[in-house]
Image: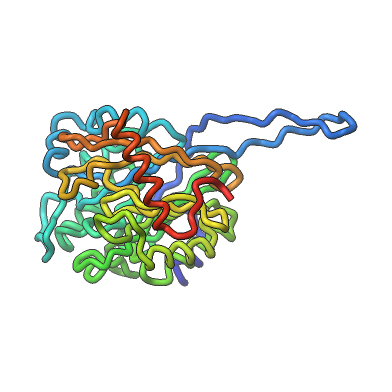
Amino acid sequence: MSIAAALLLTACSTGAAVSSSSSVSTRSSSLAPTRPADGTPRPAEASQRFTINFAGDVHFMGRTAARLAADPATVFGQAQPALADADLTMVNLETAITTRGTPQAKEYHFRTNPTALTALKDAGVDVVTMANNHAADYGAVGLRDTVAAINAGGLPVLGIGANAKQAFAPYETTINGTKLAIFAADDVDDETTLRLFSAGPHQAGVADGRGPELVAAVRAAAKAGYTVIVYLHWGTEDVICTNPAQQQWADELAAAGASAIIGSHPHALQGAGWRKDGVYVAYSLGDYLWWTADQVSEYDTALLTLTFDHGKVVAQHWAPAEIDDRGVPMPATGADKKRINKIITDSRACAPGLSATPR
């Protein structure tokens, strides 16, 4: 049976190791009754409005490792209140979770300990993607440790697992009457993650976005009545403009039924907005809690809050932030806030077909 077919027959609560279903506490609201011309009261329509926070790449190396060791509950510092202020919050955790293994043949290697998952929960993060090009930085041994840490951690982690079924399994929940399915996948052509540690039927690894599984799974979930969100690791590093592969992926996922497509990996803010078909795309959210900065652009970030109603994104809100010397995304003010907002606007100009308002 294909992964897409399996998704139609099983829910996350059946025991997939890295996917979970939960009841999310929401701030409910309702619409006031309206009256037709004859004055007869019309029943109020139940609200299906909810919010989701999205942030980019999170690390617990270097300066952020020291923060994790000092106090997991306060790692995100001044960013924490805004990060937790939504019905659901999601980030990309760009690291292996292991103290063992062999560094792979690549320039950068990232790892942390299971306390990182506790720190994320303490900060108000509800679901994490690890479908990225650093989840298997310490080889097969490190990957086994990572999956084991996720299984024991109590935080839903997507895009990685003991096999492809787990790696492609969505996070499922219901918020204000809307059934939600969130998928995650990696599209970075990395020596270790995709070439050696792409999840297979009997192989641990990350969800490989280059195959047919992701689009098929999104289509199946949309047909089953879910509002679908996809968080992808993709794009070109250190540029604000999208590349053709990202645009093609957005076309395919939108056609399959995704309502929102979120991205990370470029270490820079990239274009975001509504497509002509009404699908919302944020090509890259840049870095968020970050261990160092190789480029000036890596200091600029933002927390993106999307408001959904009846399965569609109806509003966006950006909270610009500047990553400080501690690695903490400090809420931006004054000239910094204006500059980061301008980057958000300018990057939309080189992401073809996006509008700043719903269509």
How many numbered discs, if any?
Answer: 0
Coordinates of residue 138 in the picture (x, y in percent) = 14, 58
Out of 223 and 1, give the one closest to the viewer: 223
Q: Is residue 306 visible?
A: yes
Horizontal side, residue 256 vs residue 209: left or right: right
Q: Residue at x 16, y 34 (%)?
A: 326
Q: In the current view of this chain or complex, which residue is farthest to the right?
A: 38
Q: Is residue 228 above or below residue 290?
A: below
Q: Residue at x 11, y 60 (%)?
A: 107
Coordinates of residue 72 in the picture (x, y in percent) = 21, 32
Coordinates of residue 136 in the picture (x, y in percent) = 20, 59
Q: How is the image coloured?
A: rainbow
Q: Is residue 17 visible?
A: no
Q: Is residue 3 above or below residue 353?
A: below
Q: Please identify the quarter of the rendering in which residue 189 is found.
A: bottom left
Coordinates of residue 303 in the picture (x, y in percent) = 36, 39
